[in-house]
Image: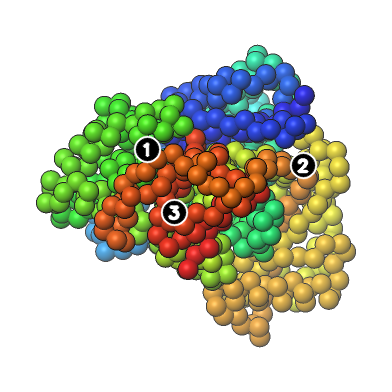
Amino acid sequence: MEFRVAVDIGGTFTDLCSLDAVSGQMTLTKSPTTPRNPIDGVMNCVTKAGIDLHEVNQFVHGTTVGINAIKQRSLEGQVALVTTKGFRDVLEIMRTNRPLAGLYNIQWQKPIPLIPRRHRLEVTERVNARGEVIRNLDKKESEKISRQLRREGVISVAVCFLHSYANDRNEEEFRGVLKRAYPQAYISLSSEVNPQVREYERTSTVVIDAYLKPVADRYFTALENGLSEGGLSAPLMVMRCSGGVMTAKTAKTYPVHMIESGPAGGVLGSQFLGKILGLENLIAIDMGGTTFKVGVVDRGAPRHASGGEVEWGVPYRAPVIDLSEIPAGGGSIAWVDNGGILRVGPESAGAEPGPASYGKGANNPTITDANVVLGRLNPDYFLGGEMKLDAEAAEEAVRMKIAQPLGLDTVEAAAGIILVANSVMLESMRVGSVERGYDPRDFATICYGGAGPVVGGILARDLGCSQLIVPPYPGIFSAIGMLAADIRFDSLRSYMSPTNRIDLDRLNKIYKEMETAAFAQLQDQGFKGTPTFMRTADLRYEEQNYEVETPVPGGELTEDDLKTIIENFHKEHRKLYSHAKTDEPTELVAVRLAAIGATPKPELPRVSTGHDESIARKNDRNVYFEDLKKFILCQIYERSKLAAGIRITGPAVIEEVSSTFVLYPNQTATVMENGTIIVKLP
């Protein structure tokens, strides 16, 4: 037997999806995330699913361990930055912009740098923007710095020299000096991690990579050992934030590429399901226990970005699936501020202690608790009945912390929590779609995550989407998406030139070298077929501050291809900013390549066919709908018993092990052959 397994660690639950490649049978399970030791949650899922690791030939993992380590500053004082003399404070200076919340706040403070000033050290060396070495590396200074780092207990070192993207000689020499003096140190070079212009972004990226290296090494080594002891002989694959998978070895070498690895799986799953349904345009919303995320599948492909932020003002440069994320999940805590205004988030109850309804002693009301009060969640059927919710504790938390301070009854307070949360999530959907140049009327919304189907109907309707898609097993959908992920390797080379003076021979040589190196990387990760290469380039108008990633044709590039690239840039710029200046001179800044090794895709099991929904009816329950400001008696259905072809008109609630779907009034849901539910929106 051959099994493919994917495990996704979320803020509240760890999800597992196992696929029998022979029979097509899926095994799905969830287990509470174990924040103190996330590996326990992974192994708990494996045990709970009854998986024999000897029979697994692919194990894919998405994890939040990287982003959590940064947000928690878990390696404070153990990571250092070595940079060119005079550039010690690049991390401190940052950029001069502010978040909207800080524009008029005189008490606003910039984020604290990941590395304190005492561990930001300077060395004498200099390279200019053309890659010419103006001053060789001072090796005596380098040796002194290396001994100091070892003496002070630094375990990981980020190296970022000025203009090393154009010539990495001095960075390589410093690595040699440091390795001889301190062989145990983890080392990240900016010329390897992000060989690209913009000093602050490059410095921030290599610092994040260095920060994650010890974390990734320890985590994946321990996980590999645990899985190996359980009988796994297949390599452990890790989800990349760009939407592919890489070996754990590659993740340890370039850990910056595993940031937000779990959420990428959900967008890949949306792309995969969209192809099955014949839908190319999707707005993907993922609502879990701690966050709400929005991604876009445009013309059949996930929208990508050249980087992101681990927190406001702390950027990283690595290809990522473009996600808009806010702290609004089922565990987001509702509270009343000093001005008497109801707020939801950003604090989350997480997995421990969780919402008040989890019965673990928490008394802060959350979105989950509000949904319990409003009858949307069945306290006796959470996780298919495996976990009971305490409805009385949920009501008490909402009453004490929200209703009484605001002079409302408990139901009004719970409805208020939902309305506030929904408004924030709807705005996030607008940011992730409209503000990126998309018309929601041309898109369907696909909702997943444990809490996504609870709010999907109202959010998709209010955004103006054409239809709502509720995938099979929505609470574990990101893990399913990981099984559809291809092996992927992304690379970048800096090449700055006005487009009318590009050296075609040099450009073709760069792409050829990148393709050769990327193919070798895919082979090193176990891929044996013929890869697909996707070329892009970063272009901008002359003297513009930021670039636009632009499609580039394959093969040997000609003068006509250059014209096509520039035309593509104008199209992308118009799409993003609603204007383009076709008569303005343009510049090339960098070239990019994504090498993709295709993997077999899972098949979703088919459900039986029928038109009698009474088989799936469980009972009736009063459910509160905020639009109508009242409870309505709703039919409750068991999703696993719904046959293909059944149509249900709302209001209704469809329950399953991993999630609950709330069908709003005047909406009609149709069950498809693979169990997907499609709702046409008026």
Check disc 2 and give the amino acid type: Thr
- Cα distance between the residues tagged 2 and 3: 36 Å
Q: How many marks?
A: 3
Determine the residue located farthest toward the bottom in the rendered image.
583
CA separation, marks 1 and 3? 15 Å
261 and 477: which one is in front? Answer: 477
Q: Nearer the viewer, residue 315 or 196?
A: 315
Task: Report x, y in % for residue 424.
Answer: 36, 57
Q: Which residue is mark 3?
A: 663
Q: Is residue 257 left or right of residue 372?
A: right
| Horizontal relation, residue 340 to residue 245: left or right | left
User: Is residue 101 in sight in this rendering?
Assistant: no
Q: Which mark is residue 599?
A: 2
Residue visible at 71% across and 42% down in the picture: 603
* Quarter of the image where one finds residue 17: top right
Within 10 Å of disc 1 (Cα), the crowding (few <14, some 14-19, many 20+) is many
The kind of residue tagged 1 is Asn
**Quadrant location of the N terminus?**
top right
| Position of residue 671 in the picture relative to residue 245 (left or right) | left
Number of the label disc, if any, that sits on residue 378: 1
Three-letter amino acid code of the residue under disc 3? Leu
Q: Earlier in the sequence, mark 1 or mark 2?
A: 1
Residue 127's spot in the image, x, y percent? 64, 53
Residue contact at pointers 2 and 3, CB within 8 angstroms: no
